[in-house]
Amino acid sequence: MQAQEKTLEYYMQLSYTVEVKHDPGSEWSWFARVVELPGCMTEAPTFEELGSMIEDAMRSWIEEGLEHGDPIPEPRDVGEFSGKVNLRMPRSLHRDLVRRAEVEGVSLNQYMTTALARSVGR
């Protein structure tokens, strides 16, 4: 589809990445942002309200961009990533990771995957 043919409805059907955070100590304790749309975010007092509010925020963000002729980023397809990474590291770090994996009783690959997932909040 040509850029000028892409409509609000087109963009709203795409699978954007929405990050959600919860702060139980706040009146508006639920926060969401759309990763691919810089500045597209909202807050809500309950999780149930958050879905419609982030959808409204996305709609407004995209409408504004279309009105001004700004480029609208699209989500990256998961198929673009192989899941493989070649990584160089100091030998001492490699040794320490192998030892930790042995202590945990898992493979080095599984240990590193788990550690990386934790670092990005998964």
Image (tube, rainbow, N blue to C red):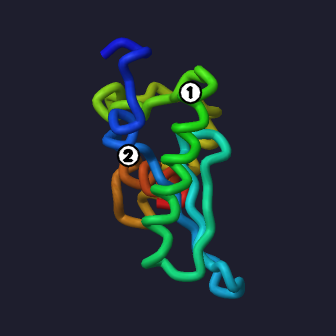
Location of the N terminus by quadrant is: top left
Between residues 32 and 98, which one lies in front from this camera angle? 32
Image point 34% across, 25% down: which residue?
A: 80
Q: Give the residue pinned by disc 1.
A: 88
Image point 34% across, 52% down: which residue?
A: 107
Position of residue 98 measured from the top left corner of the image (x, y, whole percent): 48, 49
Q: Which is more N-terminal, label 2 or label 1?
A: 1
Neighbour class for label 1 at 10 Å: few (<14), some, many (≥20)? few
Residue 46 to residue 82: above or below: below
Mark number, residue 98? none
Neighbour class for label 2 at 10 Å: few (<14), some, many (≥20)? few
Q: Quadrant of residue 25?
A: bottom right
Residue 62 to residue 103: above or below: above
Image point 55% across, 53% down: which residue?
A: 57
Residue 67 to residue 4: above or below: below
Position of residue 116 measured from the top left corner of the image (x, y, whole percent): 51, 50
Q: Quadrant of residue 45?
A: bottom right
Between residues 38 and 120, which one lies in front from this camera angle? 38
Q: Give the residue pinned by disc 2.
A: 109
**Kind of residue sitting beneath label 2:** Asn
Image point 51% across, 48% down: which residue?
A: 58
Check the image and name the residue furthest to the front.
67
The local secondary structure at tag 2 comes to helix
Position of residue 71 measured from the top left corner of the image (x, y, whole percent): 56, 22
Between residues 50 and 105, which one lies in front from this camera angle? 50
Mark 1 to mark 2 CA distance (whole Å) = 14 Å
